[in-house]
Amino acid sequence: MADVKGGEALLFLTDEQLRQGIEAMFFAYRGFTADPDRILETMAYGRAHHRAIHFIARSPGTTVNNLLAILGVTKQSLNRVLRTLIEDGLVESRVGTRDKRERHLYLTDEGETLERKLSDAQRARMRAAFRAAGPEAVTGFRQVLEAMMDGDMRRRYHAIRENGA
């Protein structure tokens, strides 16, 4: 099997190799979230706040229902997070123009500043990792991540990438 090329060898992963991949994802996620966690801790916020801020920034004017679908959390949980962010002046909720029942979410200037600070920390970590791994590894990494997504999540991911919705 010494003559098997890199990608083909991946078709024959052992349980131990898969376990190592799972563990690598756990530790990478800890690293990926460590910098924003330190920033958020000073404000008594957590990762739920970060995720909401991220996706509101990515899709200004997104609805609460769309955010619920992206985050996969309960309405009660999201409402707690949004209430805090709105009260603290980071997020603005506007009534829909077509449907008055809809609430559209926007970051305030202060919210945009916080989002930039959180994202800058993660972009720096991703940039360093991508540079160290090289372009082929980056492409492979993205392919693996997309392959792990459920179909609906993959569609949402592509929609966000294409038009920020």
Image: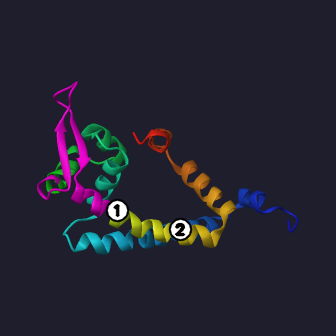
Q: Can you tell which quarter of the image residue 10 is in?
A: bottom right
Please state which of residues 73 and 111 is positioned toward the viewer in this rendering: 111
Whether residue 48 is visible here, answered yes or no, is: no
Please state which of residues 23 and 56 is positioned toward the viewer in this rendering: 56
Q: Are marks 1 and 2 in contact (CB under 8 Å)?
A: no
Residue labelled with disc 1: 116
Q: Check the picture and name the quadrant holding the C terminus.
A: top left
Residue labelled with disc 2: 127
Whether residue 75 is visible here, answered yes or no, is: yes
Taking the magenta stretch, the answer to whether it contains residue 48 is: no
Neighbour class for label 1 at 10 Å: few (<14), some, many (≥20)? some
Neighbour class for label 2 at 10 Å: few (<14), some, many (≥20)? few
Q: Check the picture and name the quadrant holding the N terminus.
A: bottom right
Give left or right: position of 84 versus 116. Answer: left
Judge whether 95 appears above or below 2 on screen.
Answer: above
> N-terminal of the two: label 1 or label 2?
1
Counting every numbered tag in the picture gives: 2
- The residue at 31%/48% (across/down) is 56
Give left or right: position of 141 versus 43. Answer: right
For the record, the magenta segment spans 86-115
Please state which of residues 15 and 147 is positioned toward the viewer in this rendering: 147
Q: How is the image coloured?
A: rainbow
The amino acid at mark 2 is: Arg
Please, which residue is most extreme toward the right here? 3
Please state which of residues 5 and 98 is positioned toward the viewer in this rendering: 98
